[in-house]
Amino acid sequence: MSLVNEGGLMMYQVPVLTPTNYPVWAIKVRSIMDAHNIWEKAVPKALGEASDQKKSKQALAFLFQAIPEDMVLQMASYTEPKKVWDELKIRYLGVDRVRRTGLATLKKELESLRMKEGETVDDFVTKLSGLASKAFSLGYELEDGDLVKRLQDLISISLIYK
């Protein structure tokens, strides 16, 4: 949600990180920080990039607003926004093994997904899209062709049983 203040500037609501919303939270925070030209301080483009202290402090302040209070206390010693961002990513996405496990679970869920009686194609497509989004947030992109084939197979199966 954004608001326009009297000066014509866009104001953005700061999303707060919860134990379950990291993938969506990260997208929103990155987008807002990018709109305020402070994203490059959280994740610099190049090693040794000239530091803009004001933007770095703005990025750090923004990140501290977007995380729970107990986490602010844990990260209070960090002076670089990139360190905060990287620590959050590690905590919420976990190590590579956890990511692979999550992907394996999503693949099994995709394979076992069936249209329920009375479920519309739109509802089912929404489920497929949700699985694709979860996979993308874990660093894996499901191919559109695979999703379309899965949808066609399931529609065919559901028509046979009607």
Image (cartoon, grey):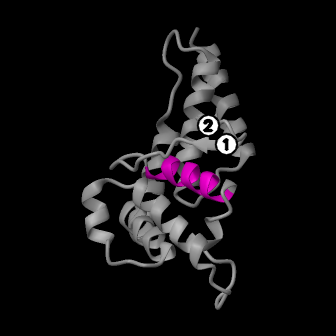
Dot 2, how many residues are within 10 Å of its Cα: few (below 14), some (14-19), or many (20+)? Answer: few
Up-down: is 134 above or below 126? Answer: below
Q: Position of residue 33 (x, y in %)?
A: 61, 58
Q: Secondary structure at mark 2?
A: strand
Up-down: is 94 above or below 1? Answer: below
Mark closer to the observer (2, 1): 1
Dot 1, how many residues are within 10 Å of its Cα: few (below 14), some (14-19), or many (20+)? Answer: few
Total number of numbered discs in the rendering: 2
In this rendered view, identify the residue nearer to me: 119 or 18: 18
Q: Which residue is mark 2?
A: 2
- Judge from the rendering whether residue 140 lies leftward or rightward of residue 146; answer left or right: left
Q: Give me the disc on residue 118.
A: none
Q: Quadrant of residue 122?
A: top right
Q: Position of residue 48 (x, y in %)?
A: 64, 91
At x 52%, y 9%, the residue is 118
Q: Quadrant of residue 131?
A: top right
Q: Which residue is mark 1?
A: 10
> Can the viewer see residue 37?
yes
* Residue stretch rendered in magenta on the structure: 22-34
**What amino acid type is highlighted by mark number 1?**
Met
**Image quadrant where one finds the C terminus:** top right
In this rendered view, identify the residue nearer to me: 109 or 123: 123
Q: Position of residue 103 (x, y in %)?
A: 48, 56
Mark 2–mark 1 CB contact (< 8 Å): yes
